[in-house]
Amino acid sequence: MRKFWPSLAILPLLGVFLTGCPKPATPPPPMRPAITDSRPANSKSGDFLGKPSRPSAGADTTADDPLAILGNPDDATDSPRNQDHFLMARPQMTLSYNNTLRFPNWVAWHLKASDIGETERSNFVPDPDLPAGFEAITTRDYSSSGYDRGHNCPSKDRTASPEDNQVVFYMTNITPQFHEMNGGPWEGLESYCRKLAQEGNELYILCGHGFNQGQESAKTIGKDGIAVPDFGWKVILVLPEKRGDDRPRIEENTRIIAVQMENTKRISGPWDNFITTAAQLEKATGLRFFKGLPDSVARALKQKRDEGANSFTSGPSGFKKSNRRSSGGSFGAGARR
């Protein structure tokens, strides 16, 4: 039987026909669901509130995130649209920034002996992590104002490294303070806290400022209109330093120091002239403390009134009451009653 072979003349046409045929379209890969990043704005991948979620081998595993214990007093969020309660979380401290007041609503940090070193003071600089739309305060706003650039988290609490110290000199950690307060009882309490840490304790510190008659009538300074608060306050939990999760160790007998100091030129005296309770500070500020603790423990701690620097001696097992008379226990001159 005779076989049929195509003519050589039509082979090129056949090739054009075959190569010109469109290939079947490859279906697109399936759409992946959107992933919402719920981490605070300034944390890095793998961080929780700015702290590594899994400590490296050999690292101290103390659960020292201050908000895990102190809670989020004003429910601040990391949304840039929440400009008056904007959560900024870093390993050195966590704060709620208020873009209307131009200073933080509160600042929270954990303090232990290893945080205290020999690093020199840094320079005040605008916070590089403020989102677009926020006013970047500079140190020039304080020039000739009559007010100190008052730290919330103090410089000496973050002297283990230059990086730690620079963060507390961001202007988001600064509030206008009269020098009489800043260099007086305020500084006295800062030094006392570091003394406790160097004696083998660890502290959870919450700090901020407030207004007697509302922030709307507050005086302002600088071209950016930084509000001047009427008083400063602090809430401090003190524990013997120990590795591991600190929350189970906090109970009704844990030492708590709460102070409220008037931001005036008239203020004087030692820090423990200005002792109050956390419950009174909640009324004065509208904040809510200790959200990270069981309700019964939180209620008990809020009612406790510390007995001052001279009423306790610290040791390896914690605090023991001293027979020395307390110099504190009530508001001093210039304190808000």
Image (cartoon, rainbow, N blue to C red):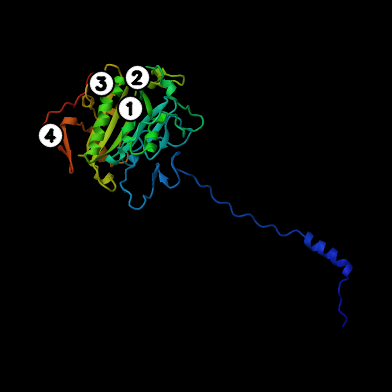
Mark 3 nearby-residue class (10 Å; few <14, some 14–19, many ≥20): many
- Label of residue 335 in the image: 3
Q: CA distance from mark 1 to mark 4?
A: 32 Å
Q: Which residue is mark 1?
A: 285
In the displayed structure, 44 sits above or below 332; it is: below
Q: CA distance from mark 3 to mark 4?
A: 26 Å
Name the amino acid, label 1: Thr
Q: Position of residue 326 (x, y in %)?
A: 15, 28
Q: Quadrant of residue 43?
A: top left
Q: Quarter of the image for the N terminus: give it.
A: bottom right
Residue located farthest toward the bottom when viewing the structure as drawn = 1
Q: CA distance from mark 1 to mark 2?
A: 11 Å
- Label of residue 322 in the image: 4
Q: Which residue is mark 2?
A: 213
Q: In front here: 190 or 327?
A: 190
Q: Earlier in the sequence, mark 2 or mark 3?
A: 2
